[in-house]
Amino acid sequence: MPEKLKIREAIVVEGRYDKNTLSQAVDAVILETGGFGIFSSEETVKLLKFYADRVGLIILTDSDGAGFTIRNRIKGCIAADRLKHAYIPDVYGREKRKRTASKEGKLGVEGMDGETLKQCLIRAGATVEGEEAGKKSGLGRWDMYSLGLNGKPGSSAKRAELCRRIGLPERLGADALLDALNTMGLTAADDIFDAYR
């Protein structure tokens, strides 16, 4: 059985199936939003704030529209310096327990394998026991503009292409992509950007 990653931050997922899948890959506090229940449960919001203030919080929602809506709700409730964002890649298919694929046809957190989930958390800057925290690269908005990833014709398509290449959801906006790239420790000099120069 593969070794679990011991992660300091609490991780928030949408539901119990996500929690079950993730708990097989990591040793961490895993919290559930109850899907859209996050919008009506002040108790859930208080719990998320409690963990965010004490150990930090990593958001790991599905890469569909619902997942981004839930992620945005959490972003509106928790201080940005207490949050890290983990993104699963866009993988099309259906979860084993379901008869049909989701509305957008993408696998959610529950459909990912353990190694993929671990890599998503590591790229998000999770504090893994026994490892030194990664440093930020310092990419800024100017870098995004000069690479053609924001503010130019075709920027949206270029961002989607880059997201596909590095295993992030295609629907990331410019600011969310910038955060993800900084979390991953990429710099404007990295080879990943050669196609955008």
Image (spheres, grey):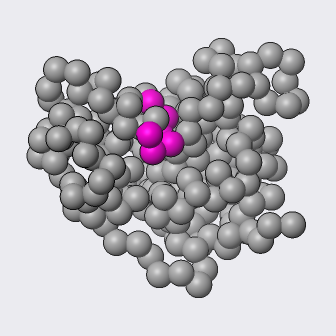
Tally the marks.
Answer: 0
Name the image quarter holding residue 99.
Answer: top right
Question: Magenta span covers which residues?
Answer: 165-170
Give how far across and how far down residue 21 sits, in percent.
78, 49
The relative height of residue 23 versus residue 152 in the rendered view (above or below) is below
Residue at 84% in and 24% down: 98
Side of 192 relative to 13 (left or right): left
Q: Which quarter of the image is occupied by the C terminus? A: top left
Q: Which of the 4 image quarters holds residue 48?
A: bottom right
Find residue 114 and report its horizontal and vertical position in percent: 73, 54
Can see residue 17? yes
- The picture quadrant where one finds residue 70 is top right
* Residue 171 in the image, given as x and y percentages of width and height: 43, 28
Main secondary structure type of the part rendered in magenta? loop
Query: Which quadrant does the N terminus fall into?
Result: bottom right
Q: Residue furthest bottom?
A: 130
Q: Residue at x 50, y 29 (%)?
A: 69
Relative depth, front residue between 169 and 6 = 169
Image point (35%, 63%), residue name: 185
Pick whichever, 47 or 115, lies toward us: 115
Tell me, yes or no, whether the highlighted magenta stretch contains residue 119. Answer: no
Vertical arrangement, residue 136 with respect to residue 86, above or below = below
Q: Is residue 104 above or below residue 114?
A: above
The image position of residue 156, as x and y in percent, is: 29, 25
> Who's the residue at 33% across and 49% down the image?
192
Q: Is residue 50 visible?
A: no
Answer with left or right where residue 137 lies relative to residue 10.
left
